[in-house]
């Protein structure tokens, strides 16, 4: 397979993206509203969305809490444009960039969420991100991660080794983000979150290989 850079991959698939996610991903019709229902219900709640895409989870969240304030970060300008059109009447700030690089601030958000975005990165990359995220949450803040996970540590290792092989064969930039699934196991993801400073990390529900995790400070 030919690897594509992350932003280019999603830009090329914007047409029909929402329908694909909702109909082709196991459990999506359940896990998007389930994830949204876990987010704060108070008007004025401040939420950070990592890899917000076209805002599928935000459709359910804003329907329940129209007074929430959301900051969404995504690599794809095209995805963010589609999201902005959906929620023009809501309080939302959109940032085009890598959530690894964008500063989050400190003690700023009541909750953070990420859905089907973080399964492309290493444990080392996530550890730095989760430390930054932990600092950005308020004292009672929490993170909801609903994502695709590997079935075993061996499968996890195979995903990463295959990605490196493809990069070498195709002469690609080692540090650039390419679209290729490299999920951690649920257990490994929880270990990384705890190492980053989250005190209470637990799995909530699963839909096939997708699981919702709740991490509290």
Image: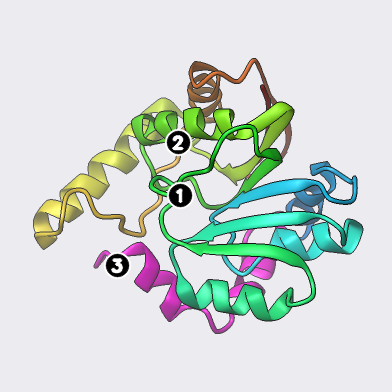
- Residue highlighted by disc 3: 4
Q: Is residue 51 left or right of residue 172?
A: right
- Residue 142, x across and y down, in percent: 70, 32
Residue 129: numbered disc: 2
Q: Residue at x 53, y 39 (%)?
A: 149
Residue 90: numbered disc: none
Q: Quadrant of the N terminus?
A: bottom left
- Residue 122, x across and y down, in percent: 36, 36
Q: Residue at x 48, y 23 (%)?
A: 192
Mark 1 crowdedness (10 Å alpha carbons): few <14, some 14-19, many ≥20: some
Mark 3 crowdedness (10 Å alpha carbons): few <14, some 14-19, many ≥20: some
Of mark 1 and mark 2, the one earlier in the sequence is 1
The residue stretch that appears in magenta: 1-28
Residue 99: numbered disc: 1
Measure the alpha-carbon separation of dots 3 and 2.
Answer: 23 Å
Vertical arrangement, residue 70 with respect to residue 19, above or below: above
Mark 2 crowdedness (10 Å alpha carbons): few <14, some 14-19, many ≥20: some
Q: Nearer the viewer, residue 129 or 95?
A: 95
Measure the alpha-carbon separation of dots 1 and 2.
Answer: 8 Å
Vertical arrangement, residue 26 with respect to residue 185, above or below: below
Instruction: Tell us which disc is closer to us: 3 or 1.
Output: 1
Q: Is residue 19 left or right of residue 9?
A: right
Instruction: Tell us which disc is closer to us: 3 or 2.
Output: 2
Q: Nearer the viewer, residue 102 or 191?
A: 102
């Amino acid at each position: 397979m030919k690897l594509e850079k992350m932003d280019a991959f999603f830009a090329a698939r914007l047409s029909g993206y929402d329908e694909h996610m909702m109909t082709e991903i196991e459990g999506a019709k359940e896990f998007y509203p389930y994830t949204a229902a876990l987010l704060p219900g108070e008007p004025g709640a401040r939420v950070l969305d990592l890899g917000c895409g076209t805002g599928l989870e935000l459709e359910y969240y804003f329907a329940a809490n129209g007074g929430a304030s959301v900051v969404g970060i995504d690599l794809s300008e095209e995805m963010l444009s589609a999201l902005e059109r959906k929620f023009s009447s809501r309080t939302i700030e959109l940032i085009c960039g890598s959530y690894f690089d964008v500063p989050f601030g400190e003690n700023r958000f009541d909750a953070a969420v990420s859905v089907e975005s973080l399964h492309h990165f290493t444990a080392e990359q996530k550890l730095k991100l989760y430390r930054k995220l932990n600092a950005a949450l308020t004292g009672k803040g929490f993170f909801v991660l609903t994502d695709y996970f590997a079935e075993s540590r061996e499968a996890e290792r195979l995903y990463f080794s295959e990605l490196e092989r493809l990069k070498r064969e195709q002469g690609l930039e080692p540090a650039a983000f390419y679209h290729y699934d490299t999920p951690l196991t649920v257990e490994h993801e929880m270990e990384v979150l705890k190492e980053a400073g989250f005190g209470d990390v637990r799995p909530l529900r699963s839909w096939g290989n997708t699981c919702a995790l709740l991490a509290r400070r």
